[in-house]
Amino acid sequence: MTERPPDDRTTSGHFDFDEVFKLNLGYVIHSLRRLGVREADLEDLAHDVFVIVHRKSTDYDPSRPIKPWLFGIAVRTASEHRRRASVRRETLGHTVESPDPSLDAVTRIEERQKRELVLSALESVDESRRPVLVMHDIDGFGMKEIVEALAIPLNTGYSRLRLARTEFAAAVARLRKRGGIT
Amino acid sequence: MSDHDHDVPELDDALRDLLASEHARPDVPAEMSARLLARVHATIAAPVAADLSNEADASPVDAATSSATTSSVTTAVATTGSALLTKGAIGIALVSFVAGAGVGVIGHANLATPPEPEVRVVVREVIRNVAAPATPAPPIPPPEAVARTAADAGARVPEAGVDAGAPTEDAGEPETGRDLGLADENALVSRAQTALARGRAGEALEALSEHQRRFPRGQFTEEREALAIQALSRLGRMEQAVARAERFRARYPGSLMMRVVDAAVRTP
């Protein structure tokens, strides 16, 4: 499991929207991508997430870490987006990120391939289970925080993680075999 | 209990490394961050534009008793038209003629008179939420001038407890039609929240009914329902409040607003 992220509670307990936005936009963007939102829709959905964040800010409990709360909003926003529009499967290749200039070209290509593999494999994980896998195995949150953010029972969280890991592993194996990736 | 205790299979090292690589993503470009923040502020600050096109068809879902609002004006113009006889009506008339005068009276009475076609002219106006104004409220713009301007953004009611960064001159208009939709939703729920805070539960329910009509499955449905339950409770409509609270609990079992919903319907 990845290292647990550092405590990211708002610094003073007071909800400064602009500060929350600037510190967490990247996390929200990447979370939406991992939840299957197309590159072309990322800015729109991130905008929607933060409008909702602003509206719900009085409901936020500052004693809890903010990222799981933001992720929960991102999950619902992405789900609503899928429900409203028939979204075609993303053709990978387009990215909002700039290549890291400190890496050599070969490493950059390898990193890009790795990302494409992860995102493609995540798309094979059932929509209801993907958020748990992302929060647990990519973001490093504990199951208690995950089930609170997603408003699901604890046993459901573990059940979804179990199934999601199986689906993810199978997808990676299949994609590697198909693409000749090692 | 650990993951292992819940029969969660371990990830092998290769998969763990793969997922770890996804964890370490670079931050978004500063230009994108600034652009999006401005866009969000524009949406938050935008006043709602009334959609009056379906006002006559609005479902009375928990509609409040009307109270004075700063809101909508609809201008309706009706035109009359002449009744048209359909082939079926002609047939009935012929039968009636053959059958005699008495039957003819009955037949004539049965001729369907099509409803007079009606033309409604809908005026779309900008509604502003105005807090206790230090200066007189600006005049409502003429119907043809439905424009959300930066000046309108300045009339937004700030939310207590949130340093939202008051709209600046740079917080322009929502950029796209999709942002306008979310802005309208946001503004309607804000209007309801403000009305409720000021003890105007009826006005709050009006705004929430409009939200329900225009955005039945909008982004702020959960907030709408929580506010509606509180408004119903304050109006003494406890049976409706309790019923709606039950539906809320079923639909949003882990809601952070459960506490206020429970408090609204709790018997003293």
Image (tube, coloured by chain):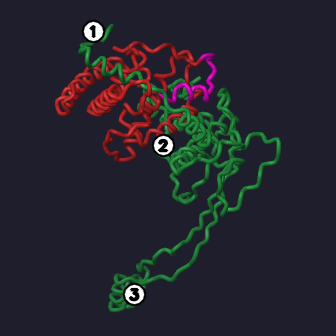
Q: Amino acid at mark 3?
A: Gly
Residue B17 or residue A86, whichever sits in front: B17
Q: Is residue B108 above or below residue B220?
A: below
Which of marks 2 and 1 precedes in the sequence? 1
Q: Amino acid at mark 1?
A: Asp
Q: Which residue is mark 2?
A: B218
Q: Position of residue B157 (x, y in %)?
A: 69, 38
Q: Nearer the viewer, residue B32 or B218?
A: B32
Element under disc 1 = helix
- The quarter of the picture where residue B18 lies is top left
What chain letter is assigned to the residue under label 1? B
Residue marked by disc 1? B5
Res B8 visible: no
Q: Residues within 10 Å of mark 3 (few under 14, many from 20)?
A: some
Residue position marked by numbered label 3 in the rendering:
B104
Note the chain letter of the red one.
A
**Position above or below: B70 against B5:** below
* Circle nearer the viewer, 3 or 1: 1
| Crowding at mark 1 (Cα within 10 Å: few <14, some 14-19, many 20+) | few
Chain B's colour is: green
The structure residue drawn at horizontal position 39% and vertical position 22%, both measured from the top left corner, is B23
**Could you tell which of marks 2 and 3 lies nearer the N-terminus?**
3
Q: Which residues are magenta?
A: A11-26
Separation of marks 3 and 1 at Cα, in angstroms: 86 Å
Is the residue at mark 2 from the same chain as the one at mark 3? yes
Magenta includes A25?
yes
Q: Quadrant of residue B124?
A: bottom right
Which residue is outermost to the right? B135
